[in-house]
Image (cartoon, helix red, strand yellow):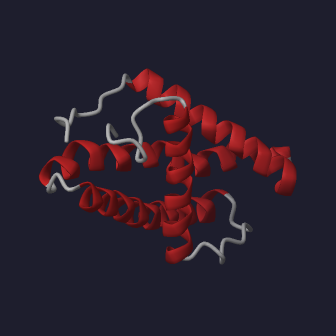
């Protein structure tokens, strides 16, 4: 296995990508469910999985992965487990934030298991896009 490099990215690039994702998805959700007046609050809620999720992945890449055996199967299982636990934490944060910003929002469906599984699905999809662009990802030995 190649030597693992720590991942670094300028904060400006991270913020541009993650805020952009949250704003676009927030607009889509607002238009399809609540109306455009909830777009700012929904964007703030979606910053948890987009911006918070970035830091969960960085924690795995730069802290946990170097401490794991070089076995690819162990690293992949740990990556998925990190996403699942991180998704649970982010789901909890989304619910708390939603209760504060959108008290009438119904998030009963957002259980810990749903949040964890949804975050794993989001990350696998994002890493598939990275892989298709030839960038390091979960699917390539480089990421």
Q: Residue at x 45, y 49 (%)?
A: 53
Q: Residue at x 46, y 23 (%)?
A: 13
- Quarter holding the C terminus is top left
Percent x, y of residue 71: 20, 56
Q: Quick check: 24 above or below 57?
A: above
Q: Position of residue 63 (x, y in %)?
A: 19, 47
**Residue appearing at x 13%, y 52% in the figure:** 67
Q: Is residue 116 left or right of residue 32?
A: left
Q: Is residue 98 above or below residue 65?
A: below
Residue 16 in which image quadrant: top right
x 29%, y 60%: residue: 73
Q: Position of residue 106 (x, y in %)?
A: 72, 72
- In percent of width and height, residue 56 lies at 36, 50
Q: Quadrant of residue 126?
A: top right
Q: Nearer the viewer, residue 136 or 24?
A: 136
- Residue nearest the viewer, comparing 21 with 42: 21
Q: Quadrant of the N terminus?
A: top left
Between residue 129 and residue 25, name the one nearer to us: 129
């Amino acid at each position: 296995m190649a030597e693992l490099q720590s991942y670094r990215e300028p904060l400006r690039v991270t913020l541009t990508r993650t805020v952009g994702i949250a704003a676009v998805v927030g607009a889509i959700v607002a238009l399809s469910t609540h109306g455009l007046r909830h777009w700012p609050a929904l964007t703030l809620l979606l910053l948890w999985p987009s911006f918070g999720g970035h830091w969960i992945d960085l924690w795995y890449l730069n802290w946990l992965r170097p401490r794991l055996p070089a076995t690819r199967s162990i690293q992949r299982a740990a990556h998925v487990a990190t996403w699942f636990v991180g998704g649970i934490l982010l789901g909890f944060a989304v619910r708390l934030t939603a209760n504060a910003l959108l008290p009438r929002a119904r998030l009963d469906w957002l259980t810990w298991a749903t949040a964890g599984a949804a975050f794993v699905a989001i990350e696998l999809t994002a890493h598939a896009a990275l892989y298709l662009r030839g960038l390091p990802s979960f699917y390539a030995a480089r990421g």
